[in-house]
Image: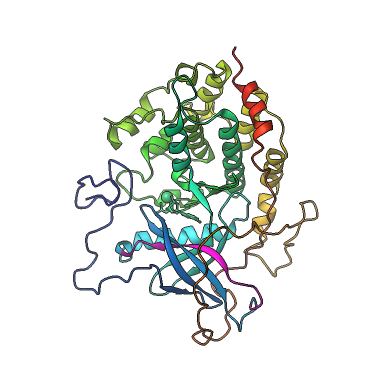
Amino acid sequence: MCGQCKSLVEDQAQFCPHCGSAIVAASVNAHSAPPQRLGEGSQVDLGWGRVAVTSRLGEGGMGVVHKGWLYYNPEGERATEPPHPVAIKALHPMLRGRDRARRLFLSEATLLSRLSHPNIVHFFGLAEGDQLAIVMELVDGSALNEVIARHVQRAVPGGLPAMPFARAWHYFSQLLGALAAIHALGIIHRDVKPANVLVRRDGVVKLTDFGIARVPAEEAKNTGGMAPGTGAYMSPEQVLGRDIDARSDLYSAAIVLYEMLVGVTPFDRPERNEVMVRTAQVQETAKPISQLIPQAPRILDALMAQALAKDRANRYESAIAMGEAFRKALDLPESAGWSAQQEFAAHAQVISMAVPQQGSGVPTTDPGLPAQVAPPSAPAVPAPPAPAPAQPHSPVRPEPHRPRVTTRTQPIERFDAGRLRTAMMTAYKKP
Ligand SMILES: Nc1ncnc2c1ncn2[C@@H]1O[C@H](COP(=O)(O)OP(=O)(O)O)[C@@H](O)[C@H]1O
Ligand SMILES: [Mg+2]
């Protein structure tokens, strides 16, 4: 049975044909000790620090995510840094015996450790002990699917079915920025969907879940059977198991934009199962947005048609090109946030290439980039538990497994209701 949607699936299935989630075996090994679950009250040792785990944040096909507090080892390099909130994603306990799941999880940690972008969750470390766990930035907010659902619930007859365009653009432009940066490094996310796009309370977007992300050279190692991913957001070439490039992520991002505006994805219907949705991705054409939102400008249909072209040769060639096409056609202002995205994309290689080669003369700072600013203020989380005892720390091991990631944060403009309302009026003015 699928742990996510409760559908019955074949014994050997790795992914649910209905919702696309990874299938969790009922028991990995009947004779092994029951897997120890990471949960409230447990601790994760990183050597150079330890995480006291608190409440549960969410769950996907691969992992269970909890909140926690990271305490730096008092004997370590970062002893003077105060504890701070983090998120901990542990490999699902029932997947621990699975080599492939373990490999994907380690690959997620490796990719994340290379990335440094304000719209990608920041990686702190990997615990490789009894339980694999990625320690990352806590995003205090909701996943985009929850944000969309709230907009749909609040919709009134005659009004917009989901988000106003300006807000959707605010999130979309940040998602495009994150994609531009990973694409510059040759990384394809492959699972761009609202559940993997976290929205902080102040409107800052953070792309997460690099669980099935790949660099193209690894693409060929894909397993047989149904391609992993969620049908409603998958590009036709991904559905067909063909080789994919950055344009596949851009197709998925366009579906996310469509859903933000319309409240539903173009090919998913309640009566369709996963196979039918995937088939529709390849065969059907998305209904133009102006047929669903009378206020929407016709140009949006043309933009969306290009973004969702079945043949990737007819799509936008890059995340920035796609964003610029939407921005210009919809007469949106060239905001500081969007300009910063273009700059980040242009410098992504310099920033991230510096990480694995640290100490080899590669500069970790670039005078052409904005100065580092303070990290975002601490999110509202429950008071931290009593600090972990100092004594159990092993000899000083400052960040032994992963290279230190240089954090660069660029303040992305806050949600400016007044200005965005004006932009929305422009975008939605009657043709
Ligand atoms: N850094 C984070 N901060 C806050 N919530 C998170 C964070 N990472 C994940 N989550 C929550 O946990 C859910 C599952 O995380 P995800 O990385 O997508 O796992 P999976 O690979 O199992 O799909 C997300 O949809 C989100 O609700
Ligand atoms: Mg996920």
Q: Is residue 109 left or right of residue 184?
A: left
Depth check: give the residue in front, 429 or 319. Answer: 429
Depth check: give the residue in front, 380 or 375. Answer: 380
Residue 244 image position (x, y, % from top left): 47, 40
Residue 246 image position (x, y, % from top left): 53, 40
Total label count? 0
Residue 193 in view, yes or no: no
Q: Is residue 419 above or below residue 344?
A: above
Residue 77 image position (x, y, % from top left): 65, 78
Q: Which residues are magenta?
A: 79-93
Q: Which residue is found at the position 29% from the left and 63% from the top?
A: 94
Picture colour scheme: rainbow
Residue with the most extreme top position: 431
Residue 218 in view, yes or no: yes
Q: Is residue 232 above or below residue 298?
A: below
Q: Which residue is found at the position 35% from the left and 28% from the top?
A: 280
Q: Is residue 26 left or right of residue 325?
A: left
The quarter in which the C terminus is drawn is top right
Residue 90 painted magenta:
yes
Q: Is residue 12 left or right of residue 134?
A: left
Q: Is residue 156 above or below residue 67?
A: above
Q: Is residue 320 left or right of residue 365?
A: left
Residue with the most extreme right position: 367
Residue 218 painted magenta:
no
Residue 286 image position (x, y, % from top left): 43, 23
